[in-house]
Image (cartoon, rainbow, N blue to C red):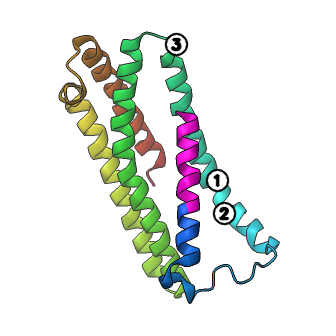
Amino acid sequence: CAVATSLGYWLEFLAMLLVMRHARAYRSLRLFAALEAPAWPVLRELLRLGAPIAGSLLSEGGLFVAAAFLMGGMSATAAAAHQIALNYCTFTFMIPLAFSGATTIYVGQLLGAGKAAAARFAGAVGIGCCAAVMLVAAGSMALFNEPIADLYTRDAQVQTLAASLLLVAALAVFGGWLVSSP
């Protein structure tokens, strides 16, 4: 899986590179006409701003991978149930992640335009939207844990364990909301 995924990503990169280099739509941009030396002060500032976000996403992803390794050492039932809970949690996590990315971009545009009050309001609305989605996700996992597990499999043992793991995930999502809410 790792080799196939890596190969797929490299082929995707090469395809995008070829399109950007040869497609008519990108020719006027002259993307590869001249390469400049890195602007180290700008890169340091970007790293200073982005490192906490990257660290947060890396630690969260790392925890999911670590849990998958631990589950893999258990039974096939446990691994299947974990995969169900992980898949549903990942699905629900993508929505607030998208909201947060869009909010960050919009707040940055407003700040760049010198509209600090509007940026503050947009940031608060974005945080509110993310919190609302997290609460709905936690509620759906808590209230509909069994029907969600039923969507994935007909194996009764896997369903039971997956439903339990979805309850734990609901608590984690709700706890994350409590910790991250302003």
Magenta highlight: main SS = helix
Q: Are marks 3 and 2 in contact (CB under 8 Å)?
A: no
Q: Please name whichever residue, 139 or 26, is drawn nearer the observer in this view of the structure.
A: 26
Q: Is residue 162 left or right of residue 22?
A: left
Question: What residue is at 29 percent from the left and 42 percent from the top?
Answer: 137
Say which residue appears at 46% left-offset and 76% top-offset: 119
Quickly name the residue at label 3.
Answer: 73
Q: Which residues are magenta?
A: 1-14
Q: What's the amino acid at mark 2?
A: Leu
Q: CA distance from mark 1 to mark 2?
A: 7 Å
Residue 142 in the image, given as x and y percentages of width and height: 26, 31
Identity of the amino acid at label 1?
Pro
Of pointers 3 and 1, the one earlier in the residue sequence: 1
Single out the mark in the foreground, 3 or 2: 3
Number of numbered discs overlaid on the protein picture: 3
Which residue occupies 54% across, 31% down? 65
The local crowd at label 1, few if under 14, some if 14 to 19, many if 20 or more residues have their Cα within 10 Å, is few
* Residue displayed at 36% across by 35% down: 87
Q: Which disc is residue 52 wearing?
A: 1
